[in-house]
Amino acid sequence: MASTQVPATTPGRRGRPGYDQQAVLTIAVDVFNRHGYEATSMGVLAENLGISKSAIYHHVPSKGDLLRLALEHALGGLEAVLADPRATSGRADARLEFVLRGTIAVLTERLPFVTLLLRLRGNTEVERGALERRRSFDRQVAALVDAARSEGSLRSDIDPRTTTRLLFGTINSIVEWYKPGGQLTAGKLADDVITMVFDGLHHRP
Amino acid sequence: MASTQVPATTPGRRGRPGYDQQAVLTIAVDVFNRHGYEATSMGVLAENLGISKSAIYHHVPSKGDLLRLALEHALGGLEAVLADPRATSGRADARLEFVLRGTIAVLTERLPFVTLLLRLRGNTEVERGALERRRSFDRQVAALVDAARSEGSLRSDIDPRTTTRLLFGTINSIVEWYKPGGQLTAGKLADDVITMVFDGLHHRP
């Protein structure tokens, strides 16, 4: 799995003591998720950070840049899963399982960032670009589902498009309830999801 | 399954020719889902209906009443599933399957109404009341999951709370992509969901 470090726009630390760019980004994403990106002004962000509006500009040039950095953190993580050799070679079944586990890992490690991505409406160019990358990710997973079905690993009585929708529905809904640091670890959650979607909840004696 | 008729506040038809209360409600729910309930004023509703603000008041006393009627349509449908004898007697496993199928049926038949329910934030008394009824529904399904696990129908290596979360996550996410009237019927979708969550996607020779 790729690092959870937020990529910096400029090397090294920037801005005022007490906050680095990553801390500003983390708080901004939380505010975006609570109030919506559009409804959040730089003034509201400054209030939540407890700094002046002009102090935010020490860290990032604009609200759009905060969004771009945040979405890059979510999408970069997801795309790194697909680029992993375990996603590109071997049986489609094993590749699909690797990609689903990797997606759950990125989702749980970068929860607020992926939440922001999943709630995007696509009203700005930054949002539309991110949604296009998300669709590309989804298409590649759909192709894996097709391949796993063709090799006979997945049941053929469910349409592959429905299969893909249900898989994403199950996984993406994790952002609505999962609490990192709780009793349920990200690893056990991934095991549980993989068990349910591939083997089912019914007890087999 | 209960009727899909929206309950009227007063018997018979009310208001101006061209719209009855149900038509006003259907359009209002669509506008709430697109713009958010809070962001939607009676003026915006009137614009979308192509009638004057005062004409809306012929149909319903307030925006809150529209919300209450819409949520009643969603919650009433869900609660009717739990009240059905097939949900209250017999093996827990069969009762759980019946409730999940019934939930999917209500969700697909009353899609915009359930979408509105699932996106509620709980800022008004009407919303908080609806969220409390939704939580009560969720608790009753969680109790069914517990019962099905205790009778040995469900696997014991997944925590029942996780099981319930994943079941609701899978089913509720249907509102994000399902298009009524398309190739995938609501009945086949319910079959597919039940197959995946109970038996899994893996092909068993």
Image (cartoon, coloured by chain):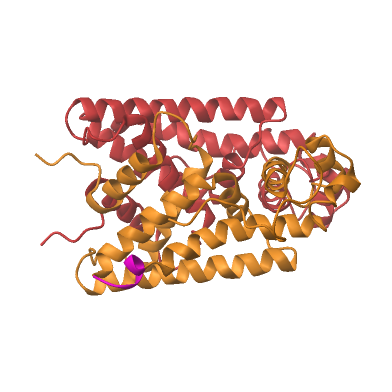
Chain colours: A orange, B red
Give me the residue at 74% from left, 33% from top.
B64
Q: Which residues are magenta?
A: A85-90
Q: Nearer the viewer, residue A85 or A17?
A: A17
Q: How many marks?
A: 0
Q: Quadrant of the C terminus of chain A?
A: top left
Which secondary structure type mostly characterizes the magenta part of the structure? helix
Left or right position of B183 against A98:
right
- As drawn, A51 above or below A63: above
Instruction: Specify the farthest residue to the front.
Output: A12
- Residue A187 falls in image quadrant: top left
Res. B148 visible in picture: yes
Residue B201 left/right relative to B69: left
With respect to residue B118, does A165 lie above or below? below
In the image, residue A152 lies in the stretch drawn in magenta: no
User: Residue visible at 37% across and 35% down?
Assistant: B162
Does residue B156 appear left or right of residue A183 in this picture? left
Quarter of the image that includes the N terminus of chain A: bottom left
Residue B72 in percent (x, y) is at: 59, 34
